[in-house]
Amino acid sequence: MSGAIFASRATQSRGRLFEEPPSPTRSDFQRDRDRIIHCAAFRRLQHKTQVFVHHEGDHYRSRLTHSLEVAQIARSVARELGLEEDLAEAMALAHDLGHPPFGHAGEDALDAVMADFGGFDHNAQALRILTHLERRYADFDGLNLTWESLEGIAKHNGPVLPPLPAALLEYGVQQDLELDTYAGPEAQVAALADDIAYNNHDIDDGVRAGLFTLDDLADVPLVGPILAQVHETHPNLPQSQLIFEAVRRMINLMVSDLVAQTRRNVAAATPLGVDEVRALGRPLAAFSDGLLADEKILRGFLLKNMYRHERVNRMSEQGRGIVSDLFRFYLDNPSRLPEDWRPMDNEARDPQTLARTIADFIAGMTDRYAMKAHEELIVKS
């Protein structure tokens, strides 16, 4: 499929909040991708937890390596479906920018301490980073991405319904991202590429970390049959190569299923443009029912044997404590924030503004920065 009629088009973009002259060498979506790659928040993903904290091993995925894997899958699927590859890649690269240190444990902790100040949501935080917190350009705050990129980042998992996170409410005053509809097809592909990437790399990382064995996976749908096929074909293959070969085949299986089911959905819905995709009331990009059922069982296995493993829980609890302690410390001592983050006198007197500033600062921390700050400000004090 080439140049799908329902694909996004850089030449038909709804534009940027702040007008800029076009690039002579790159499309608007290519510029979005490049701005994301060069921003500080993207670099910090290198030292942010996916499942394992940075110091637990050099071979486990970080948020950065995960985002690169998602981008590769999203671009490949978009190409096969005739979608806008650069847009899909940009959203895949940006989808985790809003994650605080220590993964979902850090997010839970920030959401809890921010309960009286609008809460915390990593998708909304990604939008806040891209539209406000990144300060690199002389003419505007944020990266001034296209409407399509911001829409996809805000709602790649589907419509965002009330109550809306504070960051989405604030940005909605400036630009309507139509949060009550589905995103365009490229954002939908990026979201499912995320599922494909983390299901597969969590299997790889989990086995390498010793949280479960290949034998434990024998009866798990998707991965079990593939492991059996690889072992039958290559009975003497070392475990490291066996895992990689199985993961490679599983990614291919999931990508093929996504492409085939999406094509069936396109044939049934016959959308004539990207806005018709948004108005369908259901996703256009999707896995088949059979794969979804198998994936649900696989996720259950990973939940029990990896995400709730004693070793992971112990680090998650430590991460939650660090984030909570830092928030309370800075709330009581705003003058101890770095100079660039220190609020003006009137802002320090406004609890809402102060709390959001502290949440922004902590959310931008890497795992090691947060651990070091906690050691210096709280443990040693």
Image (tube, grey):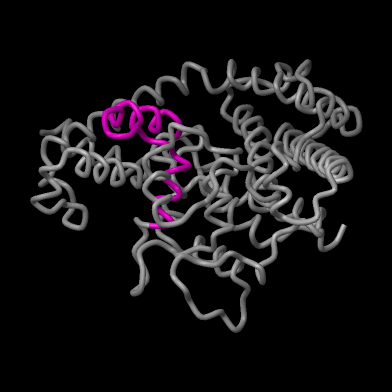
Eyeballing the image, is 92 above or below 308? Answer: below
- Between 167 and 211, the one nearer to me in the picture: 167
Which residue is at 45% across, 34% downward?
Answer: 103
Which residue is at 52% across, 18% downward?
Answer: 309
- 292 displayed left or right of 212: right
The N terminus lies in which quarter of the figure? bottom right
> Main SS type for the magenta part?
helix
Q: Quadrant of residue 230?
A: top right
> Number of labelled discs?
0
The C terminus lies in which quarter of the figure? top left
Q: Looking at this view, name the residue that lies furthest to the bottom.
A: 24
Q: Position of residue 348 (x, y in %)?
A: 12, 45
Q: Looking at this view, name the residue that lies furthest to the right.
A: 233
Residue 378 belongs to the span the image colors magenta: no
Q: Position of residue 370 (x, y in %)?
A: 30, 40
Q: Position of residue 221 (x, y in %)?
A: 78, 21
- 350 displayed left or right of 112: left
- Between 171 and 252, the one nearer to me in the picture: 171
- Between 323 and 112, the one nearer to me in the picture: 112
Eyeballing the image, is 320 above or below 184? Answer: above
- Between 311 and 356, the one nearer to me in the picture: 356
* Magenta segment: 103-131
Residue 125 belongs to the span the image colors magenta: yes
Q: Position of residue 298 (x, y in %)?
A: 70, 22
Q: Quadrant of residue 368?
A: top left
Eyeballing the image, is 165 above or below 129? Answer: above
